[in-house]
Image (tube, rainbow, N blue to C red):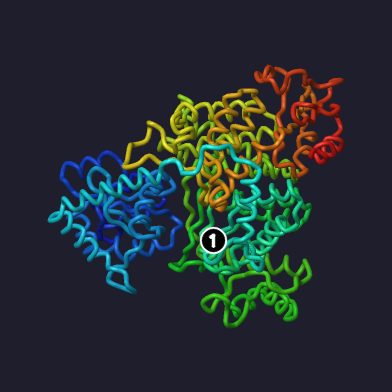
Amino acid sequence: MNATPEAHGTHRHTNRLANETSPYLLQHAHNPVDWYPWGSEALERAKREDRPIFLSIGYSACHWCHVMERESFEDPAIAELMNRDFVSIKVDREERPDLDEVYMAAVQAMTGSGGWPMNVFLTPDLQPFYGGTYFPPEDRHGLPGFPRVLAGIAETYRTRREEVTTQAGVLARHLQVQLALPPGGGGDPQRDHLDAAARRLAAGFDPVHGGFGGAPKFPAPMTLGFLLRAWHRSRDPETLRMVTVTLDAMASGGIHDQLGGGFARYSTDADWLVPHFEKMLYDNAQLAHAYLEAYRATREERYRTVVESTLDFVLRELATPDGGFASALDADSEGEEGRFYVWTDGELRAFLSEAGLSATEIDAVVDYWDVTPRGNWEVRSILRIVGAPPEPDVIARARSALLDARGARVRPARDEKQLAAWNGLLLKSLAEAGGVLARGDYLDAAGGIARFARHVLLRADGSLWRTARDGAGHTPAFLEDYACLADGLLSLHAALGRVEDLVLARELMDRAIADFWDDQGGAFWDTSDAHEAIVARPRSVTDGATPAGNSVAADLLLRLALVTGDADYYRRAHSILRVVGSALDRQPQLFGRMLAAADRSLAEPIDVVVAASSGDVGQELRSAALLPYRPDLVIASLRPGDATADWPLFIDKRPLDGRATAYVCRGYACLAPTFDPGEVERQVRELR
């Protein structure tokens, strides 16, 4: 254990995490625990000294991670037990989703539940044998105290080694089976599978509050995206209603920051009032896209408003100087979860009065936002929309005054690390929103992410880094990083028509095929040979809070097959879909993005090619093509001299009369070419 001097002549511990870039790991850099980052130094020590590994996984915006740190990892007596008997490793789950997936599956198998912080004990050869989530510092509420857990595990490892080894081996084999490809695949998805999935989702729909199931309730943007596709095909009003009721309820709820925009991670209750207050980049990127799709489908301005307030929040709060975006804002400030966002009736009224609102106006505002003397959450109020809206000017003045007051509070910490996959999700949303809403600032920000990817994340050999901070990348990327970033680049090409974005999207997917494809399994692994071999190799085909790499890849490969004419992309996409096959309709809440890919695979291809001239890049034509809700539409552009000119989709498509020209096509049969953006929008809208 190292020590560094502090002010006033005192000392504090500094462990090996001080050299890391993850804010979560750095939060633990001065614990008295002899923490290691995941790597050869820790793993070799465990083998050399025959010590069990204590592996603790969390993330910087995790409330209970902070609680366990304060209660246990900062306690010198508990740290002494850990340092004496274990090699302790701290992992940021967002940097290492492979470790999180495998060992979370182990904890769930052992305990029946999971969550973060996730704490698991491993043999030196990385096989798990005991685990859980939060452990209190002493026995409490039926949970064993962490010191008792540590002492018991150490004693068991010393005196009952054969039993530990046997149990670990059984669990390892279980994980290898569990993380293998799901049963029930083997056939191409059929339309009736998708219809059955929509019916099953309807059976779990909450018709009052929106969403699916009870508390806790997650936004599920991928599920909403699939249902919007299902409505587009069927025109069933009840299917559309599931989408709109959910989007409206979330937008009005406490999960949505009514002042500053953006969404918290999930709601602890069934009616979207009380969130866990952390704001994640991936949630806001995907929800912005869900509201954008709803706007395109319905033309309801309220959805456009949410898109813009969400993306404006992201640009304002999460942008980094190099064009990338940080990962999250913490749930806690001043030692309390949600403190930054909640109000007492008295303080809110006082701020509004100081801003010049009349008593009548203040009454209208507090009724609108559900602020009461008793509060709607622990004597404070979380702002949500429940009452009649006051005049727009009153709300605007109230929002401005409260934002100023909130700005004087201690702000939640920001997780500064930039993740390739999450930046790819945002790239897609910014590019499409910029095109649909004519927001040049969104297109500029999307271009900034593309530059960040090329200059920081992209390595000289064509591979990617998973994570970066302050211009330096590290940790080899996972499948989801390649797929999400390529997906975003394809959307950026659709919006701006730059050939370099299209070419890089294809290069990234070619690299993913080379490094992650499994011929025997017919789908992608999550990890490549650049990652350590652990107890099981993860291969995700179901979506969590972020889409599975295989889900994004299947959809992306279908689009690339259309644009490039490469039949191998089409073959691999259908291979992935056959892996999940008829399983899609059994648990559709786990397959939102894969269901969307299956839906695309069953539809006739539709595309718009914009052939630009040297003087007219065709921006208005691309924006017009983006406006209608046509979820299967692929938009590609060709400029003079582009290296993609010989790709089949572009053959015989050229600017006419020296003007940018749009070719709107279904099933490779094209309508009359046009220079007119209005005609492009009409042609696309009438595609069925």
Query: What SS does tag 1 mark?
Result: strand
Q: Position of residue 267 (x, y in %)?
A: 55, 64
* Quarter where residue 375 is shown: bottom right
* Quarter where residue 153 is shown: bottom left
User: In the shown orientation, is residue 96 left or right of residue 385?
Assistant: left
Q: Position of residue 630 (x, y in %)?
A: 74, 41
Q: Which residue is mark 1?
A: 266
User: In the shown orientation, is residue 193 left or right of residue 685?
Assistant: left
* Quarter where residue 660 is shown: top right
Residue 688 sits above or below residue 616 on the image: below
Residue 259 in view in this figure:
no
Q: Residue at x 28, y 50 (%)?
A: 128
Say few, some or many: other residues with alpha carbon within 10 Å of mark 1 (under 14 / 14 to 19 / 20 or more): many
**Quarter of the rendering occupied by the C terminus:** top right
Q: Position of residue 411 (x, y in %)?
A: 51, 61
Residue 591 in view in this figure:
yes
Q: Amino acid at mark 1?
A: Tyr
Q: Residue at x 36, y 55 (%)?
A: 109
User: In the shown orientation, is residue 21 left or right of residue 74?
Assistant: right
Residue at far left of view:
159
Q: Residue at x 70, y 29 (%)?
A: 636
User: Residue 17 versus residue 654: which sits nearer the camera?
Assistant: 654
Q: Position of residue 573 (x, y in %)?
A: 57, 33
Residue 420 sits above or below residue 305 on the image: above
